[in-house]
Image (cartoon, rainbow, N blue to C red):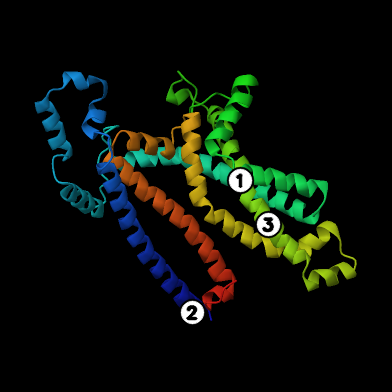
Amino acid sequence: MRQQLGIKIGAFLVLKGLRILTLLFAICLISFLLIKNSPIDPIQAYIGADMLKVGPEQREKIAEYWGLEQPPTVQFLNWGSALLQGDLGTSMIFRRPVADIIGERFLNSLVLMLTAWTLSGFIGFFMGVVSAMKKDTWLDRIIKWYCFTLASTPTFWMGLLMLIVFAVWLGWFPIGLGVPVGVLAEDVTVGDRIQHLLLPALTLSVIGVANVALHTRQKLIDVLASDYVLFARARGERGFLLFWRHGLRNVALPALTLQFAAFSELFGGAVLAEQVFSYPGLGQATVEAGLRGDVPLLLGLVIFSTLFVFAGNLIADLIYYVVDPRTREGRTL
């Protein structure tokens, strides 16, 4: 039995691997074509404020150095061959290897996204359980109103609102950045980093609770309406005991799966939140690379973000594939 399960999981992972390879190629090609056809001049963006001091010959040398004088097909093939050797290229903005920039920025984004992901998961699950257990009461209506409102709220708008209220009016948090201004790197404490992290993390988690809460609420309502729960009520089980024995196991797995599948929304929200709070993460680097035509950096970030989102969806699929036999047999839930 275990051997058969292992073979099925192996085939499942191989199929997922083929899918991610085709997805990466398509995304990289589309991103490359969009950058090449954008109105942004990468040489002008590279030169910056000194563009009036740079003559045509110097522009040609810069284009030759970065390979920008070659046809787009040649540029893409050269980049792809270097990628197969493990080289993501050098960023035109930062003048550093793309891999180093991604590694440095990813640590900041990872802490932000994990904090928001954990908070939104626990808070959303708790709100969904309370809403289902108190169905059609004033508490249920408040939670539903809260979730429906935040589900349609843009991340950047919520971030600006949080900045105005908690940073400007109340002064509880710093206005932005990842560390205090004017402080040397070796003098920055863990408390300073946490203080700069909390507001963007709260912004992402406040918005992220809606999907988990509404999904958990509906799933638990269906469970509470089942025959075995009605029988448990007839035996005198009520409240938390009823949920603990019959509801938790049935709603925890779908909520956890949905939370892993929300990696794409979390990453997209982090891009906007990092811009609002000037937080030095992958999101801010992505925007800078796109606005300044940094092809190597943008393509490297596209690959990394695709793998990150795919990893979340893969974990969600694996959980269902291992736990629920119906998915292995090809039947729908």
**Of the numbered discs in the image, which one, if any, rests on residue 151?**
1
Name which of mark 3 and mark 1 comes first in the sequence. 1
In the rendered image, which quarter contains the C terminus?
A: bottom right
Mark 1 secondary-structure assignment: helix
Mark 2 secondary-structure assignment: helix
Q: Residue sitting at 23 percent across and 26 percent down?
A: 47
Question: Could you classify mark 3 by the number of other residues whose Cα lies within 10 Å: few (under 14), some (14-19), or many (20 or more)?
Answer: many
Asked if the residue under mark 3 is in contact with the one under mark 2, i.e. CB atoms within 8 Å, the reply is no
292 shown above or below 34: above
Name which of mark 1 and mark 2 comes first in the sequence. 2
Q: Which amino acid type is marked by label 2?
A: Gln
Q: Nearer the viewer, residue 107 or 46?
A: 46
Mark 3 secondary-structure assignment: helix
Residue 53 seen in the current view: yes
Q: Which amino acid type is marked by label 1?
A: Ala
Query: On the image, numbered disc 2 is attached to which residue?
Result: 3
Q: Is residue 78 left or right of residue 8?
A: left
Query: On the image, numbered disc 3 is attached to which residue?
Result: 216
